[in-house]
Image (spheres, grey):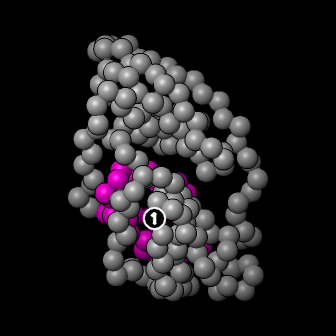
Amino acid sequence: VASLVSLDAPPTITPPAEPVVVTQSDEDFQPYVTAVVVGTHVRFPNQDKVAHHVFSLSKPKKFDIPRYRGEPKEAILFDQPGVVSLGCNIHDWMSAYIVVLATPHFAKSGADGLVSLAGVPAGRYRLEILHPRVKAMVTRDVVLIPTDVATQVISVTLGVDRRIRRAPESGAGGYK
C-alpha cells in the first residue's frame, strides 16, 4: 500500500458509507491486504463450511469475533491509523492485514508492484509505503508539482521477505 500524507494541510477524510468486506473463503482471508481510511467499518463474512474465530491483537485495533459461520453480527470500526494483523484462532495459517490510513490518497499495488495515485493536489507530501513482509514503513518526502498533463514517477525498491505464508491445501491438518 502506498499513500501520500499532506505536509501542508490536514486531509479531509470521508469513510465509505458501506462497510468494506474481508471474506473468509477456502480457509483464507480475501483479500490478503485491505487498505481503508480511518473511520471505516469492516465486515468479515465466513463463506467456508467450517467456523472461524477472527481476531487482532494489533495496537491500532484489538478485537475478537468468537467462532462463527456466515455473517458476524456487527462490522468492526477501524478508528486508528496503523497496520492491523488479522488471524483465525482455529486455523493458524490464516492471516491478513488491514492498513488503516489517515489520508484519502492511497492505493494498493498490483501484481506488478506498481501503484498509481491520481487526482492528488500539488503540494508537499510524505510518501508512505507499507508491505506486510517488510518490517518497517518506507517513507520519503516528495513534492508534487501542479500540472494537468504530466505524470510524476517515484521509484522505491523494497527488500521483501518471500517466505511462504500459507498452510497446506484446504482441509489439511483435520480442520474440516
Q: Where is residue 104 in the image (x, y as percent from the top left)?
A: 33, 41
Of residues 144 and 52, the one nearer the viewer is 144
Question: For the point 55% across and 43% down, which residue is it?
Answer: 130
To which residue does mark 1 refer? 61
Residue count near mark 1 (Cα–Cα under 10 Å), binned few <14, some 14–19, many ≥20: many
Question: For the point 35% across and 66% down, which residue is it?
Answer: 77
Q: Quick check: is 39 in the magenta stretch?
A: yes
Of residues 79 and 50, the one nearer the viewer is 79
On screen, residue 122 versus residue 172, left or right, reads left
Q: Quick check: is 158 in the magenta stretch?
A: no
On screen, residue 157 versus residue 68, left or right, reads right
Element type at marker 1?
strand
Residue interval drawn in magenta = 19-48
Residue 71 appears in the picture as rendered: yes
Q: In this view, does 63 lie above or below 150?
A: below
Give the position of the C terminus as an image quadrant: bottom right
Q: Where is residue 138 in the image (x, y as percent from the top left)?
A: 58, 36
Question: For the point 43% across and 71% down, which residue is it?
Answer: 44
Question: For the point 49% across and 85% down, which residue is it?
Answer: 66
Q: In this view, does 94 lie above or below 126?
A: below
Q: Is residue 146 above or below residue 54?
A: above
